[in-house]
Amino acid sequence: MPRGPCWRTKSGSLAMKLRPLMLLAAVLVLPSPLRAGPELGPLRTIAIQDGGRLKPLDTFARETARRVSGAVPFTGGESVRGLDPMEWLLAMMADPARWRQEPIVKVSHAGVRASAGLPPKADQRYSFAELTTHAGFLAAADKVHEKLRQDREAKLDPVEREVSSLYDTLAVMAGIFSGEALRIVPHPTDKNGAWFSLADLDDVAQPPIQRIKTLTAALIAAYQSDDRASLGAAASALSRRLAELAPATYPPAKELGVEVQYNRIKPFRLAWIAYLFGFLLLLASFPLGARWAGRSGLGLVLLGFALHACGMGLRVYISGRPPVTNMYESVVWVAWGAMLFALVFEAVYKARYFAVAAAGLATLCLILADNVPILDGSIEPLVPVLRDNMWLTVHVLTITLGYAAFLLAMGLGHVNLGLYFFAPGKTALFKTLSLFLYRALQVGTLLLATGTMLGGVWASYSWGRFWGWDPKETWAFIALLG
């Protein structure tokens, strides 16, 4: 890879048993111990062009921090643990020499460390300077780059993909140090045109740009001197001046503010916490026969469902597209669909089995989405070929709602198995649960069949044929027959 510019029981006992989980929920819901104060608020809502879309600087800082450190807020040594991503971004701009030496880059893949010959470290963290001057890592990066140079479609093995990802992370860090990654100056006329970075302003002498440069310098100086009042004033002035440069192309403050709030409240985390406690109370209501536990559990499940829907609504508003375009969104959407069907069935049959099955599965799905690195929650734009296609949207949403019904059926099947082992004599209940499971399967099959046909409509609309028995269509038909 090139090394040029980028290398710059009873109710009482039940409450006692639930107390540890309640404490855990409190820790997860309460704000993290961040050092940043309200003076950084205006800075968070500054728009930046990154990853094919316009986003708040707060989102850029969080995504970069997650790539570098593996967690938000920061994990690692005492100097960075719990550091707010926005303040970290400002610190990197203000003191690049220090942050080049700070061991914050997480290299968790053992294959990457072995192939690059990186020295073993207990915390698996290395500094930017250490990685960008390490001969073994540079050789591994060059090998991947050469492979891609010869064939842009070459298949990379897991180690090569991680090396490439680490290289890209270091390139982003280098861009922050130099200002090249901070494309916060809007294009004056073209809403879809390339924005300008702070580094691009070095040789520009126009008065509006000079004011931007002066305010940026004042912002960094205030941060370096820990003058929070001046920092807040400079951040407010910079945010206002950038928006005034190109009012026709700059994103509305409301849109940027909504995304910052989405980042702050973490609705899916709140949803799985509500689902978890609702699931536990519903589960406890069966052996205890406590109506309060069942009602409280169902209330928490409804709260989780509302938070879940709110999170998806915010993502749709922010991205301007349907909520199912990657694995993360699919997991979140399918979990929500399973809960939707469970609540509908709950209203029809007045049985808590639907809610307890769906709440357990929704909790698991959202915990995975919240914590598994491979499920990236970043909001990315659609590729052009998939934009503005109504039939594709309806096809995907319908198919995935079918998956949601099947997920609910799986949960009901596990409830049935649990009763088979712990209460084998309840034959009538087994028949009732089997009926519930069958109803969920009927809904799933109907939606899967409808979604498959809508896929044919999309194919006819896009390239002129309804069905061609290609591998994807063949396996879609096999799945429907199954």
Image: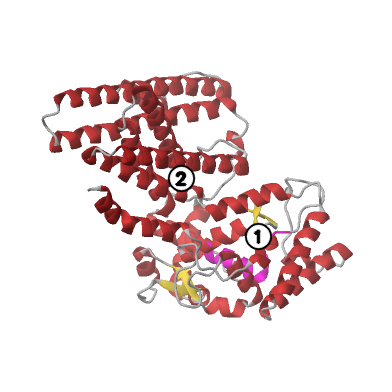
What is the spatial separation of the Cα atoms under label 2 and label 1, in whole angstroms?
24 Å
Looking at the picture, which amino acid does disc 1 mark? Answer: Arg
SS category of the residue bearing label 2:
helix
Magenta-span inclusion, residue 181: yes
Looking at the picture, which amino acid does disc 2 mark? Answer: Tyr
Answer few, some or many: residues within 10 Å of disc 1's Cα (few below 14, many 20 plus, some between 14 and 19).
many
The x, y position of residue 298, in whole percent, is 38, 37
Which residue appears at 54% of the width and 58% of the height? 63
Label drawn at residue 328:
2
Name the residue carrying label 1: 44
Residue projecting furthest to the left: 425
Q: Which one is nearer the viewer's eye here, 211 or 418?
A: 418
Rendered image coloring scheme: secondary structure
Majority SS type along the magenta span: helix
Is residue 295 positioned above or below 459 on the image?
below
Which residue appears at 17% of the width and 23% of the height? 428
The x, y position of residue 430, in whole percent, is 19, 26
The x, y position of residue 353, in whole percent, is 29, 32
User: Which region is colored magenta?
Assistant: 169-184
Q: Tell me the quadrant of the picture where the C terminus can be found.
A: top left
